[in-house]
Image: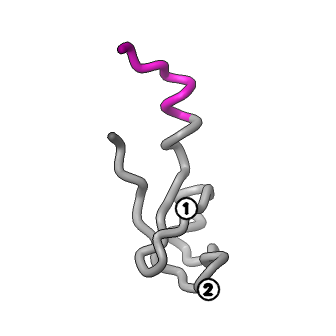
């Protein structure tokens, strides 16, 4: 199947995953790098980008 760019952006753009509890967070990358975003579940500040399938 063809990949739809709008759907790809909606699913993967600005989505990060907590490294400890694997919760998904949508946020801007600059806020993640600056450490301004906390995880809702475990309150940690370590995130990684969501892997594309």
Q: Secondary structure at mark 2?
A: loop
Residue 39 lies within the magenta run = no
Residue at x 48%, y 72% (from the top left corner): 18
In which image quadrant can residue 48 be found?
bottom left
Q: Secondary structure at mark 1?
A: strand
| Dot 1 or dot 2, earlier in sequence | 1
Res 24 label: 1
Question: Is 1 drawn above or below residue 25 in the view shown?
Answer: above
Question: Is 53 drawn above or below residue 14 in the view shown?
Answer: above
Res 43 label: 2
Q: Residue furthest bottom?
A: 43
Tag 2: Cα neighbours inside 10 Å, few (<14), some, or many (≥20)?
few
Q: Which residues are magenta?
A: 1-9
21 or 29: nearer the viewer: 21
Judged left or right of residue 40, residue 16 is: left
Q: Where does the image place residue 45, in percent across and percent down from the top left?
A: 53, 81
Residue 8 lies within the magenta run = yes
């Amino acid at each position: 199947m063809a990949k739809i760019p709008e759907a790809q952006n909606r699913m993967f753009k600005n989505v990060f995953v907590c490294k400890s509890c694997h919760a998904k967070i949508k946020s801007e990358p600059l806020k993640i790098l600056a450490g301004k975003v906390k995880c809702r579940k475990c309150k940690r500040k370590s995130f990684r980008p969501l892997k594309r399938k």
